[in-house]
Amino acid sequence: MASGTAKTMKEEATCPICLELITEPVIIDCGHIYCHSCILENIEKRQQRSPTQKIFQCPLCRTQFQRESIRPSKQLESIISNIKKMEQEYLCEEHGEKLNLFCEDDGQLICWCCERSAQHKGHTTVLAADACQSHKEKFQETLACLREQELQIKEWQRNIRKQTAKVQSENLNKRNFIECSFKIFHMVLYMEEKSYLWRLENEEEEVLKRLQEIEFQLEEQSRELNKHILELERKCQGSAQELLLQDVTDTLDRISAMVISEPEDVSLDIHTMPDFDSISHQLIKMFETDYVKVTLDPDTAHSHLLLNEDEKRATGGLPQVKHETPARFKDLPCVLGYETIALGKHYFGIYSISGPEWDVGVCQENVPRDNDMRRDPESGFWAIRRCKDYGYIALTCPLTPLSLQHVNYIGIFVDYEAGLISFYDVVTGSHIFTFPKAFFSEPIRPYFRIGEDSDLYT
């Protein structure tokens, strides 16, 4: 059978819908043949759009037919089965003959006609069955090698999974240990706080008790005086015979003998007060955190900012005559701290901040100073802001609202290597905001923007 005829038969036995050899062939009124599942699916799609539809059109010629007229084609089913068998015999496309030979020079199956053609003249050919056995052995050797490699990869995967599980397990234990350890620290601090409060309460009770005792003594003296006053008033109102001159000497001696005592001085000083600065510095140092005392850099201060002599306070809204410097902010009323952070962990505080408009945070050292650019991490700024329009916000992109009512003492922690920047309300001890993990490409410095009628002290 010529290959062209086989090709034509296959085309005739191809479903017009799925373009594959027809499966379970069925014929409709117009004579066109489809896969049973394909034509049913076509009908169901149409009924989904129009549930009452009973008459359908052939997908090829648009001839109308009913679902009940669909009938199987046993003859075509037999032909398709033979086509599949023919395909399995691997006939030569050019000559339609079986591919019984293998050309070792070209590495391909050929028929006896191909062997005699000019294309394969002089080539070494062997029976396909012999070549199959030879190459099967080579494939088996290669397959064995690949399976060994597959086993090796599976072994490596098992090792990686074991290492992953080990890391997760160990880190879980470490995480639990860290959490428990810091809970102990919290408890120690809590007990230390309670200890100071109890001692303060005891001192207060002692002082108040002593003051109450002195007040009681003064009350006793006051009652004694009132008794003598009343006695003398009564005598003064009476006649000489009745009261005034009776026991006059004894009365005067007795009253004169009374001496009032001045109350002793009671110290009102309360001595139970921890040295908070010392404790804070020790705690911060214990956790390898550098306590930074920020000093404002006047060379960076905008012309509308007034800095005091010790360069710790900045007030906004007061135009100043200042010499030009490359580092000075020219767009917004901003100023940087002298201090540069390029590694390690650091803490600095803003001890007082007030007013309707301000930013506090950090920025990269070389941010532009002469344009009204965005203040967000992408631009090199990590800060929180108070503004008239939005209240308290974190300068992320987009902005993040912060649920704060009032804050004027802010602590800022910076872990340069970890890329973490966190803000805390020092008065309440509550967390305000932590920026998503950052990557610092250059040193960073404390950054502040102080609007009109606002004031900041570091």
Image (spheres, helix red, strand yellow):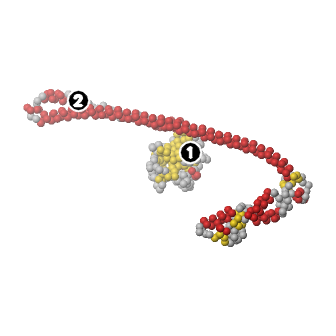
Does the image show residue 82?
Answer: yes
How far apart marks 2 and 1 lie (CA) works out to 73 Å
Mark 2 neighbour density, 10 Å: few (under 14) some (14–19) many (20 or more): few
Q: Which residue lies at the image location 82% right of the left edge and 62% below the top edge? A: 3
Q: Which residue lies at the image location 64% right of the left edge and 66% below the top edge? A: 43
Going by the numbered disc 1, the residue's amino acid type is Leu
Q: Residue furthest left?
A: 241
Count of numbered circles in the view: 2
| Front residue (pair 267, 39) | 39
Q: Quadrant of the N terminus?
A: bottom right
Q: Decide: marks 2, 1 in contact (CB < 8 A)? A: no
The answer to whether residue 157 is above or below residue 225 is below
| Front residue (pair 362, 432) | 432
Q: Which residue is mark 2?
A: 259
Q: Which residue is mark 1?
A: 420
Does the image show residue 311?
Answer: no
Q: Position of residue 40 (x, y in %)?
A: 66, 64
In the picture, measured across the screen, residue 427 lies left or right of residue 158, that is: left
In the picture, measured across the screen, residue 9 lies left or right of residue 218, that is: right
Q: Which residue lies at the image location 56% right of the left edge and 48% below the top edge? A: 436
Q: Position of residue 319 (x, y in %)?
A: 48, 53
Q: Pick whichever of labels 2 and 1 is earlier in the sequence.
A: 2
Dot 2: element:
loop
Q: Position of residue 34 (x, y in %)?
A: 70, 65
User: Which of pointers 2 and 1 indicates the residue nearer the eye?
Assistant: 1
In the picture, measured across the screen, residue 12 lies left or right of residue 65, that is: right
Q: Which mark is residue 207?
A: none
